Amino acid sequence: MVLAVCRFYLVGMGLLLVSGAAAGQLAQQAPVGPQPSAQSATTTPGVKVGQGAHAPDAVKVPTKDDLLRGGYGPYRANNDLLFYRLDVRVDPVAKTISGTNTIRFRMLANGKRIQLELAPELTIDSIKFAGKPLHYAHEERTIWVDFPGILRRGRVYEIAFAYSGKPVTQGRFGCFSFDKDKEDKPWITTACEGEGPSVWWPNKDQWRDEPQDGMEIDVAVPNGLMDVSNGRFAGSKDLGDGYTQWEWVVHYPINNYDVALNIGNYQHFSDKHGETTLDYYALPEDLDKAKKQFAQVPEMLDAYEHYFGEYPFDKDGYKLIEVPYAGMEHQSAVAYGNHFENGYYGRDWTGVGISPKFDFIIIHESGHEWFGNSITAKDVSDMWIHEGWTTYMEGMYVEYRWGKADAIRYLNGLKPKVHNQIPIITAHGTNAEPPQDQYFKGALMINTLRSVVGDDGKWFGDIHDFYQNFKYQNIMTEDVVKWWNERTGMNLTPFFDEYLRHAAIPTLLLRFDADKGEVSYRWKADEVGFAMPIEVGDSKHWQMVKPVTTEWKTMPWTGTKDAFQVATDLYYVDVSKE
């Protein structure tokens, strides 16, 4: 997300839970108020807090809803999602939505209850099993659905969850937003990564379990409007009552926050990239600009396929859709709102003169097709797997197009955006979104890992195989660390823990002794076992040293203190000279 994913770079969010913090140590901050529409939300860097800028990282006590939604309790764990069929009607005048989500699942244990979610502002019209209504209880947004008899382990069941009401516009991008285009025609979009898709449709609102057989999305809108959703377009039909139904079929597992509606007076054009269909949607007044700007997509696909492998959703194709907010990584239906300009809203995102060469939203949000959509974190706490890797992919795109030197410059331009105030990984099971450091510090950590591997040929093979090993899976940080430990033969656990589970970055302590002609060095780090090798000395002839945290080591140095350098462009560390 741009914050996701993405909702881009968490600018303007700032309400976070410190991983492992005790409740008595948590301080509460007033939440950022909801915005009236996604179209009015700004994500331009440099604006004031309250207008889309990033507030200082803070912590908050998890609400009851956070704990219910964030936890993976017995009534989630006892079933495995197989398929959603979401059939909805959207009324732009009344600003309402109504419909049914048919939910198919397999029981993993005998039980009589399952847990689903729907925002309390919406009305549950019925929940039926085999045509008969079920009993349910509403707690916050959680719906406890009770069955009259025991559902047996290994068997497949299906319920129809009918609902209606007015979705509440909330969050940075509106989540479910009824807007108007310049011609005063309805322009309705969704972007609910943080707020949760249960704001507008009933589902198992968590990340761990995705419908393994995919999803069908049928959206009825007034005649003259189009809906563009995830998956492959399966047709449209006039319902004879002033509405047209647009039908989409998702052929892959899909993260629930990726499910999207994009309703408007869209104009469509298309292309192909190998076997991948490319479909583009823009408003009429922006069609020519879109045709010019969206021409960057094939080069983006070339770069990412080069490093990580084939586009992961060929059965559904790739879509890029104009929206009234910055952008989101909706699977196979990437949302685009970067004003058809290079950079980020026309600005140099990393300040080193490289990002004006490409459209930041196209490159970042599309990268999530690999990390975030194909590979998905099981828990929000480990969202860096989406954002850190996708931000690093921006650097890989730059390297593919303009070379390694520019990629290193681009990634190092992220350093001023890092806060190092709280750990990246938040508490599991609490729906606590990590700080914006998951983007920038995450990418710089991965760039550092490249230097630790120390062989670019091996590195490119490693990142390709890492992605291929986990594609179409939901994973946690522990899975990432285990893979890299096995792949490299190194114990990288302290490395990952230092950057992800602590606020500060490691500091290389240096002491110079001119009389002895030597320099002493060791790491200052929160992880006692942190022992990352690093290149130091003369930048024309780097020397690899292996500091530890527990003792000082020495190396010869007859030059001045100022002349002694550390390869901080290749390793994200602080340096202290004495």
Image (cartoon, rainbow, N blue to C red):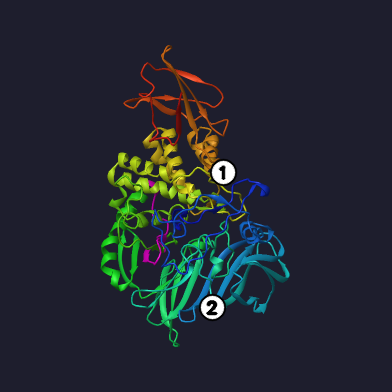
**Which residue is more in the foreground, 362 or 559?**
559
Q: Secondary structure at mark 1?
A: helix
- What label sits on residue 478 in the rendered view? 1
Residue 320 within the magenta-colored segment of the rendering: yes
Report whether 550 appears left or right of 344: right
Residue 89 percent location from the top left of the image: 49, 78
Figure disc tally: 2
Q: Amino acid at mark 1?
A: Glu
Q: Please identify the quarter of the rendering in which residue 550 is found.
A: top right
Q: What secondary structure predominates along the stretch shown in magenta?
A: loop
Q: Residue at x 51, y 39 (%)?
A: 499
Work out which quarter of the rendered image holds the N terminus and state it.
Answer: bottom left
In the displayed structure, would residue 525 be above or below residue 158? above
**Which residue is more in the foreground, 416 or 541?**
416
Residue 486 visible in the picture: yes
Q: Amino acid at mark 2?
A: Ser
Q: Secondary structure at mark 2?
A: strand
In the displayed structure, would residue 457 be above or below residue 535? below
- What label sits on residue 98 in the rendered view? 2
